[in-house]
Amino acid sequence: MMNLYHTKNQIQCVSNFQDLVSTPFHGEVNAICWTRKLTGDFSEIVKKIELNENIAALDPKELIELQLSEQGQLARDIILSDLKILKAHGASPTLNLIKCYDRDDSYPFFPTDVYSFHVDKSPIPTDTFLCTYHGDTSEILPNSQATQKVLVPKIRAELKKLYGASVDGFESFLTEYFFDLHYQAAPNAEPISLGLGHLCKLAIDHPESQVAPCLHRAPKEKAGQYRLLLIC
């Protein structure tokens, strides 16, 4: 797996939030990351919260009510600050504690869950922001190292069988069920870990985008290890 700091073509690193939100995507750059080495004990926050489902969205009030050590308080302050500046920017951030995501087994030959490399899509100009504070981190992939799955002959043939109708409407079918958003990594592909603590902005597919959308996926979580993820 490639290192964030050694990837110059796809990722541009910045040193503050203002540069993160104001720096435009350009050329091959479809990921911009505010690289940070965070202080504090984020694992303490994870251990303090009882998770009764696979994913829980944490309210800031819930964080504030936690009884934490000094290191836990430092971690909490960072999270609350990130939520605040993103909201002030106009985003709608969510803090998730994740045991695992639901797996998609509807189509064995074509899973459409977040463990598959995919792009985000919107009818209006916007970006995806994310930061992993604890646990395994999200991964991205250079667009040159993947193929849209709906263009892979064997997969496309299976999709046409699934559609089971005339050619008319097939492309709309692919879009309606989000098949067109998923990509197959090349055999020699080198995924890039976005790393712990870095707040990243990823390009998405929208009508005014000047760059290719960023291919990304969630990591397969290790048993017993939860992720603490900010995303919007």
Image (cartoon, rainbow, N blue to C red):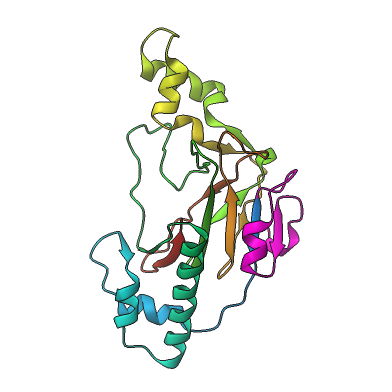
Q: State the quadrant of the N terminus.
A: bottom right
Q: Is residue 134 visible?
A: no
Q: Position of residue 56 (x, y in %)?
A: 30, 62
Residue drawn 44% across the image and 16% down it = 170
The count of marks equals 0
Q: Position of residue 26 (x, y in %)?
A: 73, 46
Magenta includes 45? no
Report the side of 74 relative to 56 (left or right).
right
Residue at the extreme bottom? 70
Residue drawn 39% across the image and 30% down it = 177
Dividing the picture into quarters, in which one does residue 15 lie? bottom right
Residue drawn 36% across the image and 68% down it = 224
Stretch of the chain drawn in magenta: 1-30
Q: Position of residue 230 (x, y in %)?
A: 45, 63
Report the side of 132 relative to 59 (left or right).
right
Q: Nearer the viewer, residue 17 or 35?
A: 17
Q: Relative to 160, does residue 110 appear above or below in the rendering?
A: below
Q: Position of residue 53 (x, y in %)?
A: 25, 61
Dividing the picture into quarters, in which one does residue 51 lie? bottom left
Q: Nearer the viewer, residue 24 or 34?
A: 24
Q: Nearer the viewer, residue 133 or 90?
A: 90
Magenta includes 6? yes
Dividing the picture into quarters, in which one does residue 104 lie? top left
Q: Is residue 104 visible?
A: yes
